[in-house]
Amino acid sequence: MIIGTLLLLLQFIRIVLLEILRDLREPTCWTNIISHCNMSSKQSGQYLSLLRSSDLIQTQEATGKVTYQRTEAGREFLRHYGKIELLLDPGISPPSMI
């Protein structure tokens, strides 16, 4: 039962991380990410920190406003992930991730 719960938790984390990455098609501010992904500021901070430490996103500061955007590694990750999804389930159409 614990293993099943952990697997569900990991799946949820994967889905949230993918949703954030997919949402960052262009530079986006933190409040838009929170709103789009429907999570608390603490949760979003943890997910954004994980994505930054994995070099999948980066921050930029312009005119006092911090924005988040995908890195090349983040774009490449989404491309590969999309290919894996197609291999595992050929019945799904290719997602528009980029």
Image: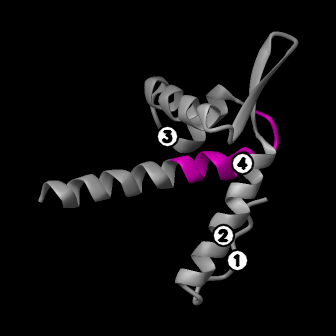
The disc placed on residue 74 is 4
Q: Amino acid at mark 2?
A: Gly
- Disc on the earlier residue, 3 or 2: 3
Can you say whether 30 is above or below 75 in the image? Answer: above
The answer to whether the residue labelled 1 contacts the one labelled 4, judged by CB atoms less than 8 Å apart, is: no
Q: Is residue 3 left or right of residue 55?
A: left
Residue depth check, mark 1 versus mark 2: number of the one nearer the observer: 2
The answer to whether the residue labelled 3 contacts the one labelled 1, judged by CB atoms less than 8 Å apart, is: no
- Residue at 68 percent of width and 66 percent of height: 80
Towards the viewer: 84 or 24: 84
Query: Furthest residue to the left?
Result: 1
Magenta stretch: includes residue 19: yes
The disc placed on residue 94 is 1
Q: Is residue 38 left or right of residue 70?
A: left
Query: Furthest residue to the bottom?
Result: 91
- Residue at 32 percent of width and 51 percent of height: 9
Q: Picture quarter containing residue 65?
A: top right
What segment carries the magenta color?
17-28
